[in-house]
Amino acid sequence: MKLWGGRFEKNTDKSVDDFNSSIRFDSRMYKQDILGSIAHVRMLGYQGIIDPEDSNLIQNTLLDILKDIEDGKVEFEPDAEDIHMNIEKILISRIGDAGRKLHTGRSRNDQVVLDFRMYVKDEICNITQMICTLSETLLDLSESHLDTIMPGYTHLQRAQPVTLAHHMMAYFQMFARDLDRLAGCYKRTDIMPLGSGALAGTTYPLDRYMVAKELGFSQITENSMDGVSDRDFAIELASCLSIIMMHLSRFSAELILWSSGEFDFIEMDDAYSTGSSIMPQKKNPDVAELVRGKTGRVYGSLIALLTVMKGLPLAYNKDMQEDKEAVFDAIDTVKMCLPVFTGMLKTIRFKKENMYKAAGGGFTNATDMADYLVKKGMPFRTAHEVIGKMVLYCTHNKKTLEELTPAELKSFSEIIGEDVYEYISLEACVSGRKVPGGPAREAVKSSIEKGRALIKSFSVNMSSKQELL
Ligand code: ARG
């Protein structure tokens, strides 16, 4: 019989059992469910709501069940619907009536969201650590490429020279924001809902703060109806994960481009590439492509969650059972992508000469040439026009700006002296941009230092949180 079967005269149809059952995906919350129940039942005993001896017996039996699950000795029953009912059923089968007291002052509605919040908190910590590792890889890479000049692009047209370090540190900033977003999401997930009951709280004198403290929550929910029906934290996590994937996907797209014969800026390590079943010459950037491809399914989870929630009247509705698969899939996907992406990035061979050569084409120093004229007293807009004509001349004569002779240069403006060659070298273009946030060595070095401190603080903060779990 179902644990809730009292008011029913018939069994549920087999198809409804299958349809309703969530055990195939929520069994992964077994640990959260057991720890949550232990904290609840300890509090019940402490408050004298149930006999302290029963409370102890339940706690010990739950620990045995946890061990048995971890040893692979427990088979969950699809008919018992979900992880919460399965564990309660096992408990009752082992200790009978004492086990029937576990659910006093609690509903599955507050129980499921407790478990889910605990699960999400733990995974936020795991994902944070993975992003920290990726970010450290970016910092190391940047450190060793402070002077590796490459073209920076706008509209995918060569624009101005930058360094590989500067380019990598742009991605670093994105992941640093992701870490910050995850920390914010953690804060809003770290709220303990037990005591909300089915929706209207409970008449038992529960000590909600005791349960929160024991489970490592920093706050309790303020409103029982919101407590059981808020899934903002899940949506927020899916949104954080979507943005992480968007960043990984942009990065992937760029690496795919760079590894093409047309760019030829990088070579992926054999260990992170695959071949073609027909074309013997092929070496494909599959890892980057798959990361880019998997971004879609994480966005899908976000949209699924937003759509599940958008029409739900207060408070709990069974629709909300759909929240878990979406979040689990998004978490699993991101956790699969991050380490393999980091491994791929670590083993890339950067073809510095090709990058340098590419930076030398496309008139990437044209802005600096205009700035040279401004320094000599010409208004910028006039200088822009003069250099525009010079570029046109160079294009017709297949020359770069620095290949123009002093006489050719003078024909565009009398004020151009021979010191211009030095001024428009790629090295000078980069090293002159010392403005904070710019690509010059000193500027990038200082943002690498700041970045190291930031990552350290995120990593320490999250591991201290994980110890509480
Ligand atoms: N398996 C359910 C879920 O994931 C648990 C809560 C069920 N509550 C209920 N009143 N049916 O949402």
Image (cartoon, rainbow, N blue to C red):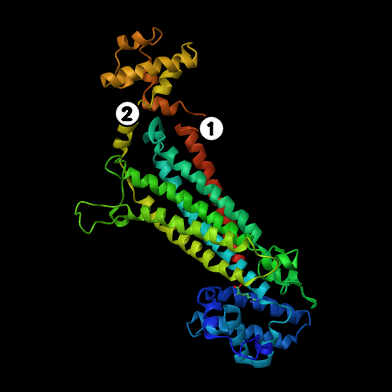
Q: In the rendered image, which quarter contains the N terminus?
A: bottom right
The residue tagged 1 is 436
Give, as a three-letter code, the residue at label 2.
Gly
User: Which quarter of the picture shows residue 279?
Assistant: bottom left
The residue tagged 2 is 361
**For residue 241, which numbered disc appears in the image?**
none
Mark closer to the chain start, 2 or 1: 2
Give, as a three-letter code, the residue at label 1.
Pro
Tell me how far mark 2 sits from mark 1, CA to CA: 26 Å
x and y, in percent, of residue 170 in the image: 47, 41
Q: Is mark 1 within 8 Å of ligand 1?
A: no
Q: In the rendered image, which quarter contains the C terminus?
A: bottom right
Ligand 1 is found in which quarter of the picture? bottom right
Front in this rendered view, residue 333 or 458: 333
In this image, 206 relative to 216: left or right?
Answer: right
Element at label 2: loop
x and y, in percent, of residue 39 in the image: 68, 76
x and y, in percent, of residue 156 in the image: 39, 36
x and y, in percent, of residue 388 in the image: 39, 18
Q: Is residue 450 above or below residue 395?
A: below
Q: Do the residues labelled 2 and 1 touch (CB within 8 Å)?
A: no
Q: Does the residue labelled 2 lie within 8 Å of ligand 1?
A: no
Which residue reaches farthest top? 414
Task: Name the residue rendered at 74%, 71% in the picture.
Answer: 208
Residue 373 visible: yes
Mark 2 or 1: in front is 2
Front in this rendered view, residue 57 or 104: 104
Q: Is residue 117 above or below residue 78?
A: above
